[in-house]
């Protein structure tokens, strides 16, 4: 398991660098299904989040490479939150993005074509912004990210 990298919500450059490194390596992952960069929002103290689910895990799993290490649009970000499949629809629209509730899983999708240059800054900003919006009062500190090479997709 990769180590967590800490970052501030307003300064996700370290996460962008993780995404770039995975994409440049075209890493197929341990099982050949691809590699994800996992972004995790800090949990709110339980007594502050008693009624709004902010004490639960909130992750954005950025699918950087697909089967065989392929890097291409669209880029999917799976949101793993207390809101389940409805999380993506709580975000509202954003130009160049689509939202999906697929089989009870929430996805935010960065659109593009084979002629579009990869925008890893926007991809990372989209993941962080989605998690921040799903938190009532997102903290500036306590965010973290890591690379997950043990992805298994069915």
Image (tube, rainbow, N blue to C red):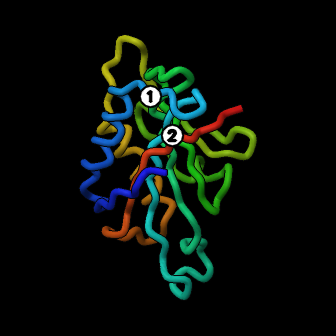
**Above or below, 89 relative to 27:** below
Quickly name the residue at label 1.
Answer: 27
Secondary structure state at the residue bearing disc 1:
loop
Spot the residue most to the bottom: 47
Residue 14: x %, y % from top left: 27, 49
The quadrant holding residue 113 is: top left
Along the line of sight, which residue is nearer the eye, 31 or 51?
Answer: 31
Residue furthest out toward the right = 103
Q: Residue at x 38, y 33 (%)?
A: 22
Q: From mark 1 to mark 2, how far is it between C-alphas?
A: 8 Å
42 displayed left or right of 50: left
Q: Residues within 10 Å of mark 2 (few under 14, many from 20)?
A: many
Residue 134 is left or right of residue 81, and the answer is left
Q: Residue at x 72, y 32 (%)?
A: 154
Total count of labels: 2
Query: Regarding mark 2 in the picture, which secondary structure is present there?
Result: loop
Q: Is residue 109 above or below residue 46?
A: above
- The answer to whether residue 104 is left or right of residue 55 is right
Q: Earlier in the sequence, mark 1 or mark 2?
A: 1
Q: Answer yes or no: do the residues labelled 1 and 2 have beta carbons within 8 Å? A: yes
Q: Which mark is on residue 149?
A: 2
Question: What's the mark number on residue 66?
Answer: none
- The residue at the point 62 percent across, 80 percent down is 51
């Amino acid at each position: 398991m990769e180590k967590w990298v800490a970052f501030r919500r307003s300064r996700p450059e370290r996460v962008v660098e993780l995404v770039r490194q995975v994409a440049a390596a075209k890493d197929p992952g341990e099982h050949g299904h691809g590699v994800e960069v996992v972004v995790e929002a800090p949990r709110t103290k339980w007594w502050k989040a008693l009624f709004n689910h902010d004490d639960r895990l909130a992750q954005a799993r950025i699918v950087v490479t697909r089967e065989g290490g392929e890097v291409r649009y669209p880029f999917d970000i799976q949101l793993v939150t207390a809101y389940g499949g409805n999380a993506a629809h709580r975000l509202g629209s954003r130009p160049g993005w689509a939202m999906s509730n697929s089989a009870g899983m929430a996805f935010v999708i960065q659109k593009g074509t084979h002629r579009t240059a990869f925008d890893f800054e926007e991809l990372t900003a989209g993941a962080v912004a989605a998690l921040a919006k799903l938190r009532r009062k997102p903290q500036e500190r306590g965010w973290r990210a890591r690379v997950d090479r043990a992805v298994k997709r069915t």
